[in-house]
Amino acid sequence: MRLANLIQLDMPLNTATSPHAKAPITVSTVMLQVALALIPGLIAYVWFFGWGVVINIFIAVVTALIAEGVMLRIRRQPVGMYLADLSAVVTALLLALALPPTLPWEITVTGTLFAIVIAKQLYGGLGYNPFNPAMVGYVVLLISFPREMTVWVPVVSMSEYPLNFLEYASMIFTGKLPAGISIDAITEATPLDSLRIHLGLGSSVADIRATFGIDEETSRLLSVVPIFGMFGGKGWEWVNAGFLIGGLWLIYKRIISWHIPVAVLGALMAISLVFYLFEPARYASPMFHLFSGAAMLGAFFIATDPVTAAASPSGRLLYGAGIGILLYVIRTWGGYPDAVAFAVLMMNMVVPLIDDHFKPRVFGH
Amino acid sequence: MSQVSYTALTREGLWTNNPALVQVLGLCPLMAVTNTAVSGLGLGLATATVIMLTNGIISAIRSHTRPEIRVPAFMMVIACVVTGIELAMNAWLHELYQVLGIFIALISTNCTVLARGEAFASKNKVLPSMYDGFIMGMGLTLVLITLGSMRELLGTGTLFANANLLFGEAGRALTIKVIDDYRGFLVAILPPGGFLGLGLLIALKNVINTRRQRKAQAVKTPSPAAVPELTPA
């Protein structure tokens, strides 16, 4: 937890003599690489859901930088140094990627402010926040604006009326829809949401798969929500694949360790496989769970936040597994569109216990 | 404790020993009821009345209460008074009574009430005890109103909505719609908003205290007499 701070402040640590090789690694290079690793997923996102997310990212990043700067000034901290570490930018990116693409701008601003001001700076800034700021912002918005936060756009190729950049901007900033278009024409529930609703109505997964098949033409004729894509949720499978690629690159660059993503995805796969084998009519397949919603984004980018995650390797495995299981439990039996935020926050709460349990033994005792 | 300073009592109740911000007692109603300013005010006044009356009674019977059974005796007094207040509110402020619901009866389990009886009233004369109860209740009420206003303003964009529950029909005019066409910020009204709001209020109080201390220390060097020495008994 304090590691981030040590690197950041470049503290003069009194170490032994000898030449020391210093890795050219700072918080800002780490954050920059995390931001770069988001690009493949972001491209897929824009491809399938349009430009709204880019506008959301812009709003969130600007708000985050201003809020961080003001809070640092109030707290009498070096503003330039902390702004340059880019951690606020990464928080804003992760939050904006989790938000619906048509969300009114003031809601995005509210969530970002909450994440930076309350969840991060009031706890003491980078390195001291017990909860993942982006997820705190997301949960506050989800609880406060349930209607706005659960509206999603359909996959561009399936939409009756795919919005272009300007139409997205006008929806986000003024709330105005393009002339002659009703809100129902441009919004739809997400695959996870529709699946939950239809299972709740008593249909089986096979029924749903038959009705909401992968054939785009049929779906459009019947005007139904396509839930399943080739291996995951429709459209979402490619977004998740993008984040998977970015995440693997982060592991390859040793920005994050493999423990947390592997534990999150492994636990999610294991528990969904058990239920899927037990009753395939009631429970979606492991592939669907791994490639829907924010599974990959959560596993590689959100759960791995070095400040709020567990510190030791075995602690990280436990922490990640907890997130994976909670993710499945809340998705399957809960009432929310996705569960990454709640799962991560709940495990953040347990981190002090995990760290205490897996404390490295002191030699000589 | 022969002579009680009313100024010191006032300062304690409202600030230095505020039941909600410093003693952090009785949080259950504090969280549950303060989603509007009016219900905060209503519960605050009810609690203030209860503490004042129980402190008075406890002080009056203090020489007849054996120390071994004092807490059960105090609890009996508190339960009786709360029941009386509850019935009175049911009769005269029926709508507010329905809004506050179970939390009026729960005043009897509010630790502040027993704490003041035990810590102050059982050792002091009737009048100072009643004043202590009153001012502690006011300290609590102020926090309840502040928290209620904050949460109501953020959550729904209004202030003193449903004031008619407390002040009769004339109270309707008190309602202020601060922000027109407000989307609402649900988390402020829900229980998390209570915790966040109280946390922020406590933080604010600490900031003010630190500022004051720093200022007092800066003044201390030229004239030590300028610093009021506060030593709580």
Image (cartoon, helix red, strand yellow):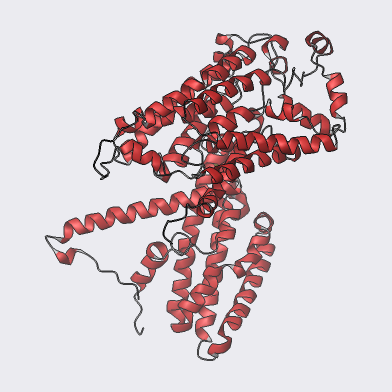
Rendered location of residue A152, percent (x, y): 66, 22
Q: Quadrant of residue B228?
A: bottom left
Q: In this view, does A3 lie above or below A51?
A: below
**Viewport quadrant of the C terminus of chain A:** bottom left
A89 with respect to A104 (left or right): left
Q: In which quarter of the image is residue A164?
A: top right
Residue found 72% across the figure and 37% down from its top? A270
Foreground: A164 or A327? A327
Residue found 88% across the figure and 24% down from its top? A207
Rendered location of residue B12, percent (x, y): 38, 67
Rendered location of residue A183, percent (x, y): 69, 18
- Total residue callouts: 0
Foreground: A207 or B107? A207
**Can residue B181 be seen from the camera position used here?**
no
B44 with respect to A209 (left or right): left
Q: In this view, does B218 lie above or below A18?
A: below
Q: In this view, does B61 lie above or below B188?
A: below
Foreground: A221 or A292? A292
**Can residue A350 be seen from the camera position used here?**
yes
